[in-house]
Image (tube, rainbow, N blue to C red):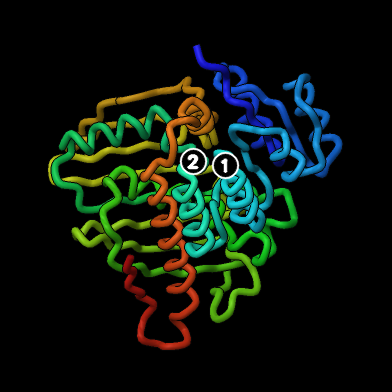
Amino acid sequence: MSALPRLGFLGLGWIGRHRMRAILDAGAGEVVAIADPSPDAAREASALAPGATIVDGLDGMLAMGLDGVVIATPSALHAAQSIQALRADVAVFCQKPLGRNASEARAVVDAARAVDRRLGLDLSYRHTAAMQRLRDLIRAGGIGRVFAADLTFHNAYGPDKPWFYDVGLAGGGCVMDLGVHLIDLALWALDFSKVAAVESQLRAGGERLLGPRSEVEDFCIATIVLENGVVLRLACSWKLHAGYDADIRAEFWGTEGGATMRNIDGSFYDFSSEHNRGTHRETLSLPPDDWGGRAAIEWARRIHSGFDPEAEHFVTVARVIDGIYEAGGAAHASEAGNQRALSR
């Protein structure tokens, strides 16, 4: 049996520690290096991986001859840190977003391709049993020809770290934080059909955001039209008065039925999925489902398999996010509408 991959973890907040625990519990990797500017976070991570060396940062980590690094730092650092690790011939698993825009994401994917190393992105909702069942149903033609989808992620809370509210550091607000999952789920379920156009409205504190982005949005409504005619409607928000913790849904409508994934009782973690036909509903999946670390585990287990061409989809998702921001900010200036065509 081959030795477990030697991994470093850069950024050890809640999400970084959770992914570390998932990989360790699955026996998918050995944690040999950890780094975080917070001594408390590093200490908590050390309790999970007592044999790991605490290093000052990425440079010290890469000097240890790792197979891969898991990056869970502020968004502004993702692209540069990922590229540095890849150029050191180290595979990368990064928290979303891969970059603050499509240009940064493109640079990371190109770096991974150049060195033939595995690049993973923590688009974790793909890995829920509920979404997996939906995709299987859609691909098997179980709801006929899909013509529309509604996707929602409303969060009654906002991020607890100040950098999330800085455009330069975060790249954007709820679209970058939550909408990225919705875009990925929609395109992934539909085999990444090409995007033709995007329309959007962005708001902060209920007010429309127009012109140069100086603050992050806390509410977004977007319409994405695919080249095959499918229409996607996306809604995401922070600090919405939702009456519960979160409203998370992905609903696909076809000529012969519908397919729905939704969170249960406002949970961030528990999901069900259904196959709908007329007034009849068939349950496809129910909790419990320990899905949070599956993307990281899959990456670690395939770390030596080289560059995965599916990483190109990370750029596609980033390009749609760019389109949402461009469309939302350009509408008022032209009065001609906020539609923007997207081309590869």
Front-most of residues 284 and 94: 94
Q: Earlier in the sequence, mark 2 or mark 1?
A: 1
The three-letter amino acid code for the residue at tag 2 is: Arg
Which residue matches tag 2?
A: 117
Q: Quadrant of residue 250?
A: top left
Quadrant of the frame with the C terminus: bottom left
At numbered mark 2, what does the secondary structure look like: helix, strand or loop? loop
Where residue 239 sits: x, y (%)?
Answer: 62, 53
Task: Please provide percent x and percent y for residue 30.
Answer: 64, 22
Whether pointer 2 and pointer 1 mark residues with C-beta atoms closer than 8 Å, the reply is yes
Q: Is residue 275 left or right of residue 241?
A: left
Q: Position of residue 150 (x, y in %)?
A: 34, 51
Q: Give the answer, above or below, for where 162 lies relative to 58.
A: below
Please indicate whether residue 230 sits to the left or right of residue 69 in the image.
left
Task: Count up the numbered dots.
Answer: 2
56 to 159, vertically: above or below? above
Label at residue 89: 1
Label 2, label 1: how far apart the Cα atoms are: 7 Å
Residue drawn at (53%, 61%) of the image: 104
Circle 1 sits in a helix, a strand or a loop, which is it?
loop
Give the camera-side residue of 7 and 209.
7
Along the line of sight, the residue nearer the viewer: 10 or 164: 10
- For image coordinates 67% across by 50% down, the residue present is 159
Amino acid under disc 1 = Asp
The numbered disc on residue 57 is: none
Query: Which residue, as the protein is rendered here, is positioned at the far right?
Result: 39
